[in-house]
Image (cartoon, rainbow, N blue to C red):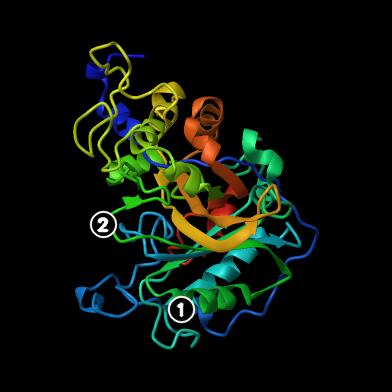
Amino acid sequence: MNDDAGLDRRTLLRGLAGVGLGLGIGAGVGAGATSIALRPETPGAADTAAPGADTGSEAARPGGRRVEPHGPHQAGVTRPPTPQQHCLLAVFDAERTDQVADLCDTIGRAVDELLAGASGELPDGPGNLTVTVGIGPRLVGAVDPALPGADDLPAFVGDVGLPQGTTGGDLMIQLCASDPGVLEPALEHVTAQVVDLRPRWRQRGFRGPGEGFVVRNPLGFHDGIAVPRTEAEQAENVWIADGPLAGGSVCVVRRLRLDAAAFRGEPVDRQEEIVGRRRDGVPLSGGTVDDEVRLQAKAPDGQLLVPPRSHARAAHPSFTDSRLMLRRGYAFDNGTTSGRDGDPVPDAGLLFICFQADLRTFSATQHRLDEIDDLMQYVTPTASGTFLVLPGSRDGAGLGGALRAGA
């Protein structure tokens, strides 16, 4: 490893990625049988124009300021720059794989209709609702197995206990809004346009207050301190750079049950050793919240200030030569479930959602966490999958236009 003083801007930014609970454990396999039947196109839906760009006059609306849905990228990834407080993520199986672009176009038209207020499903309007659509490896591979997003997640150490039916999937719809009441009717409207979608799993999530992507995770530590924020950093790390899917992204979704009680039962100094940062976000190697974790920094007695098995060290991209990921996670609380001894335990934790230009960014990092990260002993994956988030709909091409170009 190079000396800290020689780290360039890119490496410094990457190193900040291992903050708080950044990654989960688990892999998914696509499933499905055989028929996507598309409902008749809603009259005029394709011609419905969404309202214009964000305006300050809408900021005071109860549902938040409108988020522009169109452009080179879908909304719900980097737009808005501060994620909405509520999320509903749903995964489906599709019956057929021979009409993938048509499926995506149909969903895209339904989203446009919804966000334009033409559907009547949202009496108070969509507010800052965003709808982000991704397709699983089985559907991507049916278009072209060489396309980004055609590869599934590899197997990770924690995959053994993943419940049946909560890995993989053909279609992901992520809905985010300040008003949780719009999420369910919005999902119903979008999926009603497609026959023979089978629900696979779903999860509601919520975030605490904050600006930008930084928020405290369910373990009480800051997460999202460093994500690619500028357009240049996002172009390098988040978006697929070229080819027919340029402007898209590879999404990994992990539902992680956290043993928060056991973690909080540790002394605070031990919690900080496990994470590699103090609870206020400052690295154990010193500095401020925004500073790089200095992996070579040592105490006077020669001990590393950032422990060898800390999450911040294990997740540092310098060990895997991987890029940054944009983490956009939400907490969840499903009440209780049965533990190994049959007694009720909290079914709560982190709905981990990340976006990156290639799947290796996530998988290479997770393999390393499996090997040396002490934080993983408090994590149990209960759902997992990866999805190609299509480029944004623009120039009348429809959401499936990139798939036709790549076929």
Where 210 falls versus 340 (above or below)?
Answer: below
Where 209 falls versus 290 (above or below)?
Answer: below
Q: Residue at x 34, y 77 (%)?
A: 63
Residue 169 lies, in percent from the top left, at 67, 54
Residue 341 lies, in percent from the top left, at 70, 48
Residue 341 can be seen in this image: yes
Q: Residue at x 59, y 44 (%)?
A: 380
- Identify which residue, 82 or 376, lies in the foreground: 376
Q: Position of 56 compared to 259: left or right?
A: left
- Identify which residue, 12 or 164, lies in the foreground: 164
Mark 1 Cα-neighbour bin, 10 Å: few <14, some 14–19, many ≥20: few
Query: Mark 1 highlights which residue?
Result: 181
Instruction: Find residue 211 and name its label.
Output: 2
Where 338 falls versus 45 (above or below)?
Answer: above
Q: Position of 331 compared to 98: left or right?
A: left
Residue 335, by quadrant, is bottom right
Amino acid at the residue labelled 1: Gly
CA separation, marks 1 and 2?
22 Å
Residue 217 lies, in percent from the top left, at 40, 50
Residue 191 lies, in percent from the top left, at 61, 72
Amino acid at the residue labelled 2: Glu
Residue 173, by quadrant, is bottom right
Residues tagged 1 and 2 counted as in contact (Cβ below 8 A):
no
Instruction: Find residue 72 and name its label.
Output: none
Q: Secondary structure at mark 2?
A: loop
